[in-house]
Image (cartoon, rainbow, N blue to C red):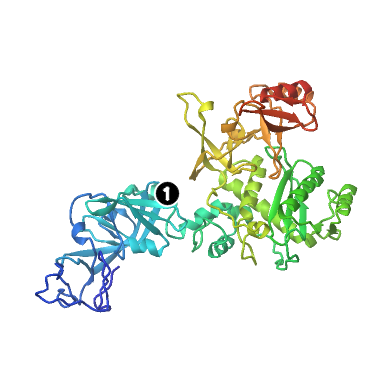
Amino acid sequence: MVSKAKSDPERSHISRSQRSSSKETKFKSGNPKQPSRKKVSQDSAPNHHTSSEVRASYLLEAFSSSNEGGWIFDSAATTHFCRDKDLFLKFEPVNNQTLVGAVDNITTPIKGKGTVHLKIGNVQIKLSNVVYAPELRKNLLSGPCFDKNGASFKGSKGNIHVFHSNNELLFTAKLINGLYYVFPEYPCASKCNVQNSKAVNIKNVSFSAENINTWHKRLAHINVDHIKTTSNLNCVKGLPKLKGNIDVCEPCKEAKGKSVSFKPIKKICSKKPLELIHMDLCDPFNKASIHGHLYFLTIIDDYSRRVFAYPLKTKSDVFNTFSRFQKRAERFLDRKIKCIRTDNGLEFINEQFHNFCDELRIKYERTNIYTPQQNGVSERFNYTAVDGINILLKDSGLGQGVWSEALLHFVYTWNRICHSNQCKTPFELYGGKQPSIKHLKPFGCKAFVHTPKQLRKKLDMKSKSGILVGYALQTKGYRIWFPESRKVIETINVRFDESTSVKLDSNNHKFERVEAVLDPDYVKNKIPLRTAYYIDNNEIVFYEIDKESKSSDESDSESKSFSEKVVNWIQKPVPRTVGKRTDIYYYEEGKKQHLRSLKEVKDYCSEKKF
């Protein structure tokens, strides 16, 4: 902190202990407890009318030459001090200002102030208003500056741990010769030629508006105002206080453009979840997803505005999907669906759907012909969801074949953010539990998946790089896609590099046939598996996948020989009558016959041409 002597007669004190700025304490000359420090008053300072002065603790230690590369973490300093001008990313010269120490009247000139970027471990921190004092031999980090920006401290066993407001560890200062030192790196220093180098943002946990850019990506490029509202209302766990505006987001500008203006939908007709359900089927995409989906069905609860999205292969899957949702939702909330609202699409206007609603006494509302605006809640979200899919695909550099994965990723984050006229998230309004978003990562970022011992040899790498495409549907974890092997797995044993997105060439955009397997920790035999696409589905569906080495002619001829029938297999653990071991059996749905291994299941499907 720098203050001019002319305008502010009371100088700022930065010392080891707190001192009163209102009144100086006087000591008698014969007092044996008189402190050894010399009081430096305004009158004793030479030329105090022409220069500014700042007092700082640890100044005497800062003139020593040991541990020159470190920064001293000072819990009493009211500003940061730096002695190396090359470390400043932004710099502003200052004239006629002096740093005056609290010990022995040590003085040193202040030549300027500016911004310094530090990288401590995997964390990048931005320091603003750093004072440039070239005659100091050590740099000082101000503890109060971190405290004002929401940081917290914990000291134990010669260490001071500094935590971000979201409880993530920023850095640790270690005790060396009575002082707490931090030894950072400087990724954005001017001597590193900032103009020609790429920004290093491995984990951007800075105390500035830059943090909102990271959360904008993690939250699937959702409207910044919604993100700020969620942050200010503390509606989710793990989201810090966000201020400022984001930088220009090119994927948002290109994908959203100037959208059509709609009248705001402010009125919520229902008072409890499931009183009114909005449904709509989005028009087919021009490219099938990696799992063969062309449509997606949205089911929106009117009260909470929670969204359930289901990618579908055909329109005929709509009824079965809604029937499954109805059973799960009513079981989860212990409440009945009272009314549903759809347009006049043939997927809804049919005898099967009508009989189903009539049997369960569900009121069925339809829009007028050629008036989709009456089903505005679903229509508006479909428009938003398509924009969100385009943004995620553009930002990640992935092909259009992963649009279904992008959809589920977008809906997952959408339900965990407050929207217009909401003080709680849709997730909490629907289920009554506050969600946490600490685990969210940007779509398409680089992932490193741990390979278990059972699936690797001694000289194999312990992890394999992939791409994050969503969050696990049936387990706790993430969905990772491997372009080379064309597999999507769900696993929790993964680490991320949020600063890197994998850019693929056109040859890697062939998603027509993809394998999806469960966590490799629990899969011993390599059999093509596709996880069920519905969150509330507990069954495992097996598909026959052609080997990549086969030619296209062989693959086409063999695929024609297989029937289109899909068999659902149920995995059931059966404890042995003697001992504590448990056997795993596989039952074909609707039959009592069981198989003992995945290999037997594969052979059975091949024999029956399923």
- Dividing the picture into quadrants, the one containing residue 571 is top right
- Against 313, is 63 above or below? below
Report the quarter where the C terminus lies. top right
Question: In terms of depth relative to the viewer, which is nearer, 557 or 208?
Answer: 208
Residue 273 percent across, percent down from the top left:
72, 60
Q: Amino acid at mark 1?
A: Ala
Image quarter hosting the N terminus:
bottom left
> Can residue 281 be seen by looking at this rendering?
yes
Find disc 1 in the rendering and name its residue: 199
Residue closer to the observer: 175 or 417: 175
Is residue 186 shown left or right of residue 245?
left
Task: Give the answer, above or below, for where 290 lies relative to 368.
Answer: above
Residue 225 in percent (x, y) is at 57, 63
| Coordinates of residue 161 in the picture (x, y in percent) | 36, 53
- Give SS at disc 1: loop
Residue 188 seen in this snapshot: no
Q: Residue furthest left?
A: 30
Write the residue at 74% across / 22% down. 604
Report whether 360 appears left or right of 36.
right
Name the side, left or right, on which 41 lies relative to 517.
Answer: left
Residue at the outermost front position = 578
Q: Residue 425 in the image: x percent, y percent?
A: 62, 60
The image shows residue 582, relative to residue 238, as above or below, that is above
Q: Is residue 297 left or right of residue 182?
A: right
Query: At 62% from the left edge and 57% from the top edge, which residue is drawn?
Result: 433
